[in-house]
Image (tube, rainbow, N blue to C red):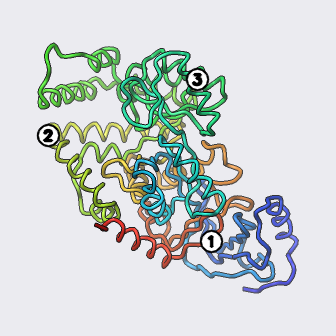
Amino acid sequence: MKVLHVLSPVLCAFAAVALAFACVRSPEESLAITNVTVIDVTGGAPRSGQTVVVAGERILAVGDTAALSLPRGTKVVDEAGTFLMPGLVDMHVHLTAAGEPDGSRRFMVPLLLANGITTVRDMGGYLESLVPLREEIKKRKRLGPAIFFAGPYLDGSPPSFEPSLVVTDRVQASEDVHQLVERGVDFIKVQSMLGRDAYFAIAEAARREKIPFVGHVPDRVTAAQAADAGQYSIEHLTNVLRGCSSDEARLMREQFHVPPRKETAAEAHERVVRWQRELLESYSAAAADALVRKFAEKNLWQTPTLVLLKHDAFPTTDVGRAEAERYVPKATRQVWEKGRERQMRFVTPAESDLRAQLLKKSESLVSEMQKSGVHILAGTDSPAPDVVPGDSLHQELALLVEAGLEPKEALRAATSAPAEFLGIGRDAGTVAAGKYADLVLLDSNPLEEIGNTRRIRAVMVRGQMLERGDLDKMLAEELAFAFAP
């Protein structure tokens, strides 16, 4: 690679753009990754023989290796035969669910980075921990992914999870939404136990405060009503399959049916199974088509978290998952194992078949939404039981492809689509000049086989390169932490 003492005219133009940002380093500190194939996650063909120049936290230039001149002092790294794509985004995590106060710092953040995840959307957690963690990362006091968060959930009484703010009327809705906006949240998260009046009051308050609201479709609200109310994303396909039923009203009534006497655990389990069977049997292609069209019309994004749905349906440890779970702290693994035992206690072969059919129906619905123009986001819900931070996003990408998305569409769901959703498309989501240098270098092409997203050679976080040796050391430290007494 020829190193020049002056900038070429083309590079000067790129430099002028980059210097508009205050975080650009001097040319002596710039880095050029040469001879890579750049993956275009927006659907264009991969561009081989490229050089990507990074200065400070930003990408300074992208161009043909043979034609691009470099600033004096640029460090050149020849990565011929490799593939460069934007950093991955997990659009559904819970950083503070890993334990307080150091769980997210010690356990989750390193696993996310080691798996190429440079941005996360935290979908419910303690602001007392999230705010300082985000600030530490922003000020480069700590290496970690960029964080967008909701803070505590808004839920009914009793709430499903903590931390939650219980909302039962319009006044509480208005006060809680305003309080969260004042505390700097990026969106409002609604949960399943909200009553109808409280839910629509939250929607109204969010419009007034000009902040998006996202989350579950509450059990007392239909998915179509959530779309009309302006909900911006639905997580886990909550109550979406119910909205595809030919008899949604009856299914809703049965959800809230109170048995005349106290049920045994086995009876309660069987009642849920009967309801799930009715949900599957009443599926209507016409109802599904109408609901999907409404999602597209209302620009209601979907984060299906298929990896969570799969683990919920089949809570058993396979070989691949056992390998990933080695990095999970021992106490957490033990909780997960007990949960699996409880969940499988009454399961029959017939129920396992029903679970498989419901999962397959969910996957086909995701495919239909993709084809109909509904935006799909890749998220995992880690560290929910069996959902290992970092590794689970690669599982999610594979499941999206299994559901019917093309590898490029699955990649978009974890890169450029999240950037658009989060309103940071000018700064992130693609490999382009002026954008943050959040990058993943791969040994193989993920467009040919989505599993190649796991073949990580290096990760760059806001311009800081983590080579394979750095990532392996990070994982080794995590393994030691996971097995510590």
- Front-lying residue, 474 or 468: 474
Label placed on residue 48: 1
Name the residue that disc number 2 marks.
347
Which amino acid type is shown beneath numbered disc 2? Answer: Val
Using the rendered view, name the quadrant where residue 79 is placed: bottom right
Residue 143 visible in image? yes
| Helix, strand or loop for disc 3 | helix
Are circles 3 and 1 on residues that touch, CB within 8 Å?
Answer: no
Mark 3 to mark 2 CA distance (whole Å): 44 Å
- Front-lying residue, 49 or 334: 334
Up-down relation of residue 351 to residue 427 (above or below): above
Give left or right: position of 64 versus 221: right
Name the residue that disc number 3 marks.
175
- Front-lying residue, 343 or 36: 343
Using the rendered view, name the quadrant where residue 389 is placed: bottom left
Q: Residues within 10 Å of mark 2 (few under 14, many from 20)?
A: some
Residue 290 visible in image? no
Question: In percent of the image, x 61 and y 74: which residue is there?
Answer: 36
Q: In the image as oriented, which residue stretches furthest toward the bottom?
A: 2
| Helix, strand or loop for disc 2 | loop
Which amino acid type is shown beneath numbered disc 3? Answer: Glu
The quadrant in which the N terminus is found is bottom right
Which amino acid type is shown beneath numbered disc 1? Answer: Ser
Label placed on residue 423: none
| Helix, strand or loop for disc 1 | strand
The quadrant in which the C terminus is found is bottom left
Point out the tag, 2 or 1, that comes first from the N-terminus.
Answer: 1
Q: Residues within 10 Å of mark 3 (few under 14, many from 20)?
A: some
